[in-house]
């Protein structure tokens, strides 16, 4: 018998008891939902985010295809670079501008690829090499690496807002509420002043940029505007770090 039009949802006849096997949407969804580790969920989110971006515009297919290939090669060489150079900034200096770019690329990809102590090493490398190489080029190389690495945070958010919202904020117990509050404020700023927030947080060293990157992806913030704002901000940060390293020699005699 066909359903009567206009019948309220609550008037529909009740189905079989939920405790019977194979019945009940909630039970079915609970059984069907696979359990993934935090790293696996981030990987799925990044894959989904890439698929979303690639399916939207043709020019992104070529650009992101090259990006993914280059990113994979860099990450494959990352462990070799770390073992070869050690964990101090001077050791990485032997690789020149390419080393500055790669180290900062990997260091800002820690949303997906955790590399202990490499974030500090990447920025210390910019300061250190500004006295050995052209400081402007050093700052640009480091900034480009940092900007490109932040794409991983965007892809995590783009691949699924539930992954971004469910991601743990790793902090000591006393700082947990503070970090959670900061994340909420960053999310609000992203919803109202997206480009300005990305640029400012990218240019100023801070521990909450990852939240902005994930939120940008979850809000479907235009990728072109994201990468331009973030890269410009990171390049400015790189130039500031390079200037600190370059002029500290004259001021402090380091």
Image (tube, rainbow, N blue to C red):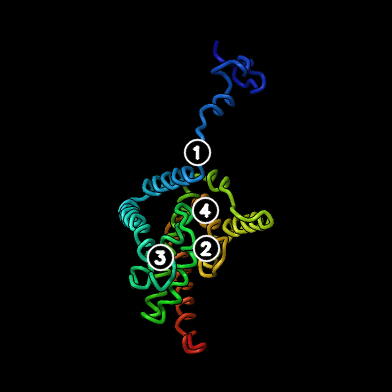
Asked if the residue at tag 4 contacts the one at tag 2, i.e. Cβ–Cβ closer than 8 Å, the answer is no
Q: Residue 92, percent across and down? A: 38, 69
Q: Secondary structure at mark 3?
A: loop
Q: Position of residue 253 (x, y in %)?
A: 48, 88
Instruction: Say which label, 2 or 4, has the lower sequence index.
Output: 2
Q: CA distance from mark 4 to mark 3?
A: 30 Å
Disc on res. 36:
1
Image quadrant where residue 83 sits: bottom left
Residue 56 versus residue 147 in the image, above or below: above
x and y, in percent, of residue 168 in the image: 58, 49
Nearest to N terminus: mark 2 or mark 1: 1
Q: Earlier in the sequence, mark 4 or mark 3?
A: 3
Asked if labels 3 and 2 touch by Cβ distance under 8 angstroms, the answer is: no
Helix, strand or loop under label 4: helix
- Report the front residue among 64 and 172: 172
Q: Nearer the viewer, residue 102 or 18?
A: 102
Q: Which residue position holds label 3?
A: 86
- Distance from disc 3 to disc 1, alpha carbons, whole Å, reads 33 Å
Q: Evaluate whether residue 91 shows in this view.
A: yes
Q: Earlier in the sequence, mark 1 or mark 4?
A: 1
Callout 4 crowding tier (Cα within 10 Å): few <14, some 14–19, many ≥20: many
Q: Which residue is mark 4?
A: 214
């Amino acid at each position: 018998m066909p359903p009567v039009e206009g019948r309220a949802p609550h008037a529909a006849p009740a189905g079989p008891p939920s405790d019977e096997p194979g019945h009940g949407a909630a039970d079915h969804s609970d059984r069907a939902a696979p359990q993934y580790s935090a790293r696996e969920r981030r990987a799925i989110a990044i894959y989904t985010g890439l698929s979303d971006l690639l399916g939207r515009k043709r020019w992104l297919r070529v650009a992101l295809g090259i990006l993914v290939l280059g990113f994979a090669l860099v990450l494959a060489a990352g462990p070799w670079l770390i073992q070869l150079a050690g964990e101090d900034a001077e050791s990485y200096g032997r690789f020149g501008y390419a080393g500055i770019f790669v180290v900062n690329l990997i260091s800002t990809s820690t949303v997906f690829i955790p590399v202990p102590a490499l974030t500090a090493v990447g920025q210390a490398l910019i300061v250190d090499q500004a006295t050995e190489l052209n400081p402007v080029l050093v700052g640009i190389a480091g900034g480009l690496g940092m900007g490109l690495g932040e794409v991983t945070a965007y892809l995590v958010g783009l691949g699924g807002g539930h992954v971004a919202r469910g991601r743990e904020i790793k902090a000591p117990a006393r700082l947990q509420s503070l970090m959670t509050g900061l994340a909420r404020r960053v999310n609000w700023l992203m919803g109202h002043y997206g480009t300005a927030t990305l640029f400012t947080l990218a240019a100023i060293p801070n521990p909450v940029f990852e939240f902005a990157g994930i939120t940008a992806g979850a809000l479907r913030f235009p990728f072109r505007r994201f990468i331009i704002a973030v890269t410009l901000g990171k390049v400015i940060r790189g130039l500031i770090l390079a200037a600190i390293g370059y002029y500290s020699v004259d001021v402090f005699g380091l």
